[in-house]
Image: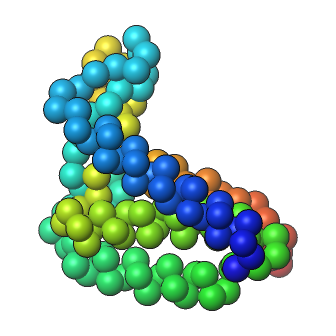
Amino acid sequence: MHKKSFGLFLLLFIFDWMTKQYLNQAHDLFSIFSWGVAVKPALNTGLSWGLAVGWNNLIALAATAFILWFLSIKMYGKNEVAAILVAAGGIGNLLDRMVYGGVRDFIALTYKSQGIFPIFNCADIFLTIGIILLIWNDRATLFSE
């Protein structure tokens, strides 16, 4: 991994960790804007969107194996930024699972104070963008005949 790549990884990882530390101190839902985005701390012991609750140890083991495998095949070339995003998000959420017994989520999308999407965190955003970039970068391979 290049120094710049490691620097980007470290920046994303620290940003995720610090937002979780700071925003999970909020005990009540409060809106950042008058509509749409609110902070609502929650501990997710399952997968994304609350699936597989109670499988925390198995999820952590599978996530560790996936991250190590993924980094070994995607860390170089056009997929380097995508791999850094996936690694930062995956390791950030993995650390939460090991320290807190689940992932600390806090970003809520709302409409008229009602949640319209499962609560998530910055690591989830990094993971999503990284996976989209990987699919985009490898689209010729993925969708060829």
Q: How is the image coloured?
A: rainbow
**Residue 51 visible in image:** no
- Outermost residue on the top side: it is 34
Q: Residue at x 49, y 50 (%)?
A: 15
Give left or right: position of 99 versus 120. left
Q: Is residue 115 above or below residue 97?
A: above
In this view of the protein, which residue sits in the foreground, 20 or 36?
A: 20
Locate residue 96, reporting x and y percent. 30, 63
Q: Residue at x 56, y 63 (%)?
A: 10
Tell me which corner region of the image, top left, top right, bottom left or bottom right, holds residue 84: bottom right
Locate residue 101, reporting x and y percent. 19, 66
Locate residue 36, reporting x and y percent. 43, 22
Q: Identify the image quadrant of the C terminus.
A: bottom right
In this view of the protein, which residue sits in the foreground, 87 or 134?
A: 87
Q: Residue at x 34, y 19 (%)?
A: 31
Give left or right: position of 125 versus 32. right
In this view of the protein, which residue sits in the foreground, 113 or 122?
A: 122
Locate residue 134, reporting x and y percent. 69, 66
Tell me which corner region of the image, top left, top right, bottom left or bottom right, holds residue 98: bottom left
Give left or right: position of 88 versus 106. right
**Residue 16 visible in image:** yes
Q: Residue at x 23, y 67 (%)?
A: 99
Q: Is residue 128 above or below residue 121?
A: below
Q: Identify the image quadrant of the N terminus.
A: bottom right
